[in-house]
Amino acid sequence: MILPIYLYGQPVLRKVAEDITPDYPNLKELIANMYETMDQADGVGLAAPQIGLPIRVVTIDLDVLSEDFPEYKGFRRAYINAHILEVSGEEVSLEEGCLSLPGIHESVRRGTKIHVKYMDEDWQEHDEIVEGYLARVMQHEFDHLEGKMFIDRLSPLRKQMIKGKLGAMLKGKVRCAYRVKTLK
Ligand code: NI
């Protein structure tokens, strides 16, 4: 089932999301819905707060990048109770977008290497060092679990430049190819 994506201004996007337990109701179905919602919106990642749930669940699909990065062929995973323990490596600027911020694309500086802990869909625990494009996407998505969005990481000047677009979004004035939930 395709779920509406919550846009900038929705309070759930500013909450610190909670860990869940294996008895969380209908988790398999929720993850399947998140994949479907992400696919139809052409996203590479989706965090549960973006569908209105303040829980630590994220889906990532990097298969669309497999032409440039063959290592991501068929890469489609869900991350449960994800936490970033450390960000390191060289800081690099890359353009990011977000399904909760349609029409906004900005360069964001982030480290290239992360230490993460999470459970997979089978509740196996992982403790990994991740690099490359996946480290970038994970940081963007896991930021959502801390109530953060990529625009928080922009310079004051760039923030000023997108102020108008954000203001319009708060008023529900947004054009988008997928179903969304605005404040108004
Ligand atoms: Ni996002």
Image (tube, rainbow, N blue to C red):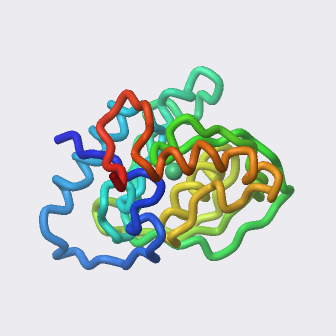
Foreground pick, 12 / 78: 12
Q: Which residue sits at x=77%, y=58%? A: 111
Q: Which residue sits at x=28%, y=62%? A: 122
**Rendered-image quadrant of the N terminus:** top left
Going by the picture, which residue comes out furthest to the left? Answer: 26
Going by the picture, which residue comes out furthest to the right? Answer: 90
Q: Which residue sits at x=58%, y=34%? A: 71
Classify residue 170 as left or right of residue 161.
Answer: left
Classify residue 174 as left or right of residue 129.
Answer: left
Q: Position of residue 132 (x, y in %)?
A: 69, 46
Q: Which residue sits at x=80%, y=58%? A: 156
Residue 139 found in image quarter: bottom right
Instruction: Work out whether 22 lies above or below 41.
Output: below
Q: Position of residue 126 (x, y in %)?
A: 48, 68
Foreground pick, 172 / 60: 172
Foreground pick, 151 / 126: 151
Going by the picture, which residue comes out furthest to the top? Answer: 67
Q: Position of residue 55 (x, y in %)?
A: 34, 70
Number of marks: 0
Foreground pick, 123 / 12: 12
Instruction: Work out whether 1 lies above or below 140.
Output: above
Classify residue 138 as left or right of residue 58.
Answer: right
